[in-house]
Image: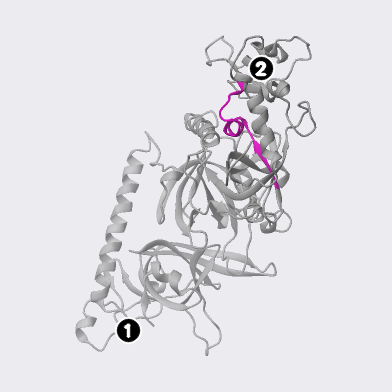
Amino acid sequence: MDVITLSEAVAHVGQNVRFIAAVQQISTGKRVLIARQRVLPCHVLHVCDASRQFFKITCWGDAPPELIHSSFTSEPEQNVGLMQMSRTDAVLQDGDIVLFSFCRIQIYRGNVEAQFIVRNNDAATSSTVQLLYRKDRYFSAQDVPLRELYPMIEWVKQYRRKFSAEDERTTSAAVKKTKDRSTLQDLRENMVVSVLCKLRPKKNKSAAAPGGGTGVCSELDGVLLCELVMFDSAGDGMSLYLCDQHAEKRFVAKLLEHRGAVEIDGIVVSLHALSNRLLANTTPHTTFRLLDPDGPDSIDLENKIARSRIVFQGSTTFTAPTGPTSFSTLEELTGSLFEGLATLKNVRIEQVCLGRHFGHAATVLARFASHLAERYCTGCNQALPESPCQDRKAQSHFVACANRCMTRRSSADNALCAWRYRCFSILLRDPRNQRLHVRADNQATLEIVGNIEARVLIEAQHNASLNSQFDAASAVASLLNALVEDANQKFEAKLVCSVVRIGDNASQVISNCQDSSLGDESMFQRVFSLVSLVPCDAFSI
């Protein structure tokens, strides 16, 4: 049996393999629910080599894996410097370079892992681990010649020096600043990072544990697991898998209830083999720090998310997250775990649901087009309620902002108000006659009506007596009505998949994901927001 590197494990799924690795972390005394019927003890190892770090090995059994005794080779020159292993040496330790044999490679949730199994049946082959090198001492050369170990030993020494130096720098700078943080946009495979983010649950009814539990266990899991989403902007989110003690129900609830930023130190970024997307995992050494909601870090993060939300909703050219962005059917989109900007081709507009009467049951009459606009506060982005008074001036139909927003915190001037298009919904239909309601906000409406701003409709209403060569109201009404006049017209629709908290303004995007292994699912609702509609062929109005 050949010795493989950890990066090659993905090519050996379902096979028993041998590999040399250095032990990074040992987590002992775990108990795991298997198939919701029985509890089995296990131990979790994280190992590494030059090709991959934090490779997970689940070792089943009450006792941690015991190192097998080393043997001398028949060649005397290979035995020079070898140490005979005592009973105290037979315990696996951090930093050991060992040879794992007959470990079975498995994939669970897209993560490539190894299973270390000790079988009671003598006829069956059990997994073994053999100590090769520990603290400048060589222990075995029977299966692996010493000369083949030298590159591995040199890499481990450099690796340990690198992280020791980083820890020293972090400790010395602790009074000034915490450990350097990475943004989610900068994360890459095989990184161990510290991030500043906010957390929210993922929604997936099929994945929820019975009784509302926080983790989902299975025979391949090996540890209690809970999946959340961490995000540091409206467009940058990543799945975070909480393992072992971090997936405990009360701890997860505490994380989700926290209003401020969360600093997570020591998470491992890996590549999801099935979807080709990055995800993050906690380890036994991962730490969480809940920051003061009114502290500078939390405020800066909130401002960053608010700024990115405007760009994320208003732009049609932002970069979508890693993963597929084109979907052929609505069923494929709604049943996926996709986050971000999605493209649907060959969809038809079955209905435009404006939510109020605009002169006709199914269309917008030009003289009512100005009612498509609404007044809103630029300070809080909330729509202003309409006044019951019958003043003919359009601006007097809306009352002042109830939040009394100011232009600045220290200013006594009220925040300005502006005009935008009201939100409405569009019913899409795909070639399989499946239907989906999507939300069209101000920016999406601007795309549909040729960038005729809502304020232009109001100004045109005020200046109705003036002769104008351009009738904005008729143009807007015609463009909206044309969406449904031709039942055979096909479009390419770009949508943003997002989750909003019920009761919040629908424009306040939390992020986009469906799964949840925790929390009240009724608190969140998945929303599909329209970004643009592009005709697939000639479009006649």
Magenta stretch, residue numbers: 436-455
Which quadrant is home to the N terminus?
bottom left
Residue 520 in view of the camera: no
Does residue 331 appear to the left or right of 86 in the view shown?
Answer: right
Q: Residue furthest left?
A: 77
The residue wearing badge 1 is: 71
- Residue situated in front as seen by the camera: 35 or 286: 35
Q: Position of residue 273 (x, y in %)?
A: 49, 62
**x, y percent for residue 384:** 68, 20
- Name the front one of labels 2 and 1: 2
Residue located at (41% from left, 65% from top):
47
From what the image shows, is residue 49 above or below residue 187? below
Q: Quadrant of residue 180?
A: top left
Question: What amino acid is labelled 1 in the image?
Answer: Ser
- The answer to whether residue 24 is magenta is no
Count numbered badges in the picture. Answer: 2
Determine the residue positioned at 54% across, 28% down: 294
Q: Is residue 389 left or right of residue 152?
A: right
Viewer-closest of 169 and 521: 521
3D distance between C-alphas at marks 2 and 1: 81 Å
127 displayed left or right of 501: left
How far across and how far down the image is residue 400, in percent? 67, 14
Q: Amino acid at mark 2?
A: Cys
Q: Earlier in the sequence, mark 2 or mark 1?
A: 1
Q: Residues within 10 Å of mark 2 (few under 14, many from 20)?
A: many
Establish if 146 lies above or below 203.
Answer: below
Helix, strand or loop at mark 1:
loop
Q: Secondary structure at mark 2?
A: loop
Residue 451 painted magenta: yes
Kindly identify which residue carries mark 2.
401
Whether residue 38 is situated above or below residue 531 in the rendered picture = below
